[in-house]
Amino acid sequence: MGPTSTRVGSQGAGYAPWLPTRVLCQFGHRIHVFCLLSRVYGGLHSQVRLGTNALKYCPRKFYYQFVQGEMLVNEFVLEGTLAHQRVHQAGTHTTAEGELETTRLYLYSEALHLSGFADVIEERGGVFFPVEYKHGHQGTWLNDHIQLCAQALCLEERQPGKPLIPHGYIFSIGSRRRTQVKFSTELRKKTRATIAQALQVATLETPPPPLSGKLVVRCPPCSLLPLCLPEEVRLLQAKKR
């Protein structure tokens, strides 16, 4: 039996009320593909992990969230929401080390057709470094690195002629540790490929199939499990073969 979930903000296909721009790329709009947004639905404060991160975790989850505008809240989503309260308050302040820190900064890229909010942007010596807060413990997760790199690509586009941003940081709230993520050529290629995949998935008329093989372990903790019904869909697909 999966985790208990609560549905919020569902208004049918193509409607995503928490997105300033529509996701349907065939109409030429930007797609929100990397950041964290929050919104109050009927008194319930929910947090949505958007885009590249969701896509790398599961394309089917991405489709439900961004094309169909579906969002379910379970204990994991709610825990992340509470852990991110500080960085979801937009503002700018100077740290004890004299660094400028901006929280919940809106970023966008016209070239890549993406936009969203960064948790934190730090400025040191005129260079901007994106920082993502994760409510779990420290780990090395490609989807998080791609999410962070996408933010760097947006920042770089707004600063033509300046050197590329060398790295960003993942701050793990559970372990209170910060990990540096280098924006290597390989990671940049993977990030651009993920963005392109997101735009392709957004044009599909039906959700992609559920995860299979070793990746099925990602299904039980997913908040969209009661909507996605991956096991049931896999059984139906097996009967048709």
Image (cartoon, rainbow, N blue to C red):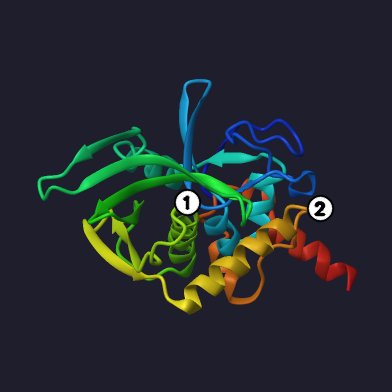
How far separated are the C-alphas under marks 2 and 1? Answer: 35 Å
Whether label 2 touches label 1, CB < 8 Å: no
Q: Which of 211/148 is in front? A: 148
Q: Number of numbered discs present?
A: 2
Residue 113 in the figure: left or right of residue 169: right
Quadrant that contains the C terminus: bottom right
| Dot 1 amino acid type | Arg
Residue depicted at x 76% and y 59%: 233
| Dot 2 amino acid type | Thr
Tell me the residue that label 1 is attached to.
Answer: 158
Residue depicted at x 75% and y 39%: 14
- The picture places residue 54, in percent across and down from the top left corner, at 56, 56
Looking at the image, is mark 2 or mark 1 earlier in the sequence? 1
Q: Is residue 85 visible?
A: yes
Q: Which of 20/62 is in front? A: 20
Residue 65 in the figure: left or right of residue 171: right
Q: Which mark is residue 84?
A: none
- In the image, residue 46 sits, relative to residue 127, either above or below, namely above
Residue depicted at x 47% and y 26%: 44
Tell me the residue that label 2 is attached to.
Answer: 206
SS class, disc 2: loop
